[in-house]
Image (tube, helix red, strand yellow):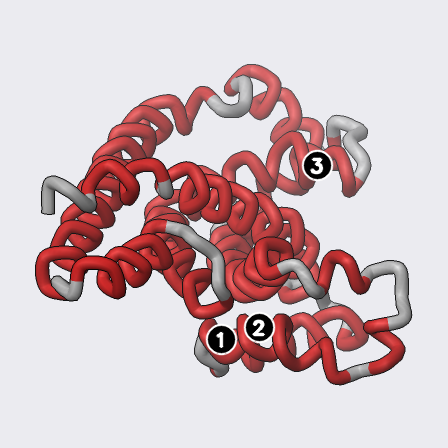
Amino acid sequence: MADVLPPMLKSLGMTGKLAVLVLIAGMLLAVPLAFARNSTSTWLSLPANGYILIIRGIPALLQVFLVYYGLAQFEIVRNSFLWPVFRDPFFCVILALGLNSAAYTAEIISGALRLIPKGLVEAAHAMGLSWLQTQFLVTLPLAMRAALPAYENEIILTVKATSLASTITLLDLTGVARLEVTNTYAPYEVFLTAGAIYFCITTTLSWALRKLERRLAIENLKAVDPGILAKAAVAAHG
């Protein structure tokens, strides 16, 4: 276990890079998906609901295989300018897990958006804020605070899901562990070491996120200036 620990720790850079990029990609896709999910327009809500339903119903491993192995079967993909991206396992993992994370994150954010009081939105409109300004200055910040407890689980699950990268030759923490097993013929010791490292990572992340959640809960009422809201509420109700 002591012999395999150094190469495993070196592989944490790859695991961390994958987790961060997947979470960023997932969040960038999840925000518009969440608004579409809550939209009153069927043209927006139906595709968003369908995407979330389908992606959440398929295992992440199959999604990785579909992106990495499946897209290569199409000649139009192999002849396109995107082929250097789709043949790279690193970008395929980010794409597959990013799409997966987007579905779960969109469901979390859409639920948080529905918790925002309508009176707050009306007050923002009464102040002269446009729909876009209202969403990004008032609604979305408050929704993200409300969504943080559930999003903590998504972050932890994404970190653990990066282990799927080892199935398509990437040497992340799990990939290095599999390589060390072939070198040492000691699967129990190697995988136990990998599991201990994952446990330390997820436990530390969980502690940090809960601390952030408690801090934001205290500052939640300060997110929007009470004086401005009071004036806006008076304007909204005549």
Relative height, residue 8 to residue 168 (above, below): above
Counting the numbered discs, the total is 3
Q: Earlier in the sequence, mark 3 or mark 2?
A: 2
Residue type at mark 1 is Arg
Judge left or right: residue 234 versus residue 12.
right
Which label sits on residue 52? 2
Q: Are marks 3 and 2 in contact (CB under 8 Å)?
A: no
Within the image, what quadrant is residue 90 found in?
A: bottom right
Residue 13's spot in the image, x, y percent?
Answer: 42, 37
Which label sits on residue 106? none
Q: Is residue 111 visible?
A: no
Residue under the point 55% across and 15% down: 227
Residue bearing the label numbered 1: 56
Within the image, what quadrant is residue 102 found in?
A: bottom right
Residue bearing the label numbered 3: 134
Spatial CA distance of label 1 from label 3 is: 30 Å
Q: Are marks 2 and 1 in contact (CB under 8 Å)?
A: yes
Query: Element at badge 2?
Result: helix
Query: Element at badge 3?
Result: helix
Judge left or right: residue 31 versus residue 71.
left
Spatial CA distance of label 2 from label 1 is: 6 Å
Query: Element at badge 1?
Result: helix
Residue type at mark 3 is Thr
Residue type at mark 2 is Ile
Residue 213's spot in the image, x, y percent?
Answer: 32, 34
In this view of the protein, which residue sits in the foreground, 222 or 102?
A: 102
Residue 126's spot in the image, x, y percent?
Answer: 74, 33
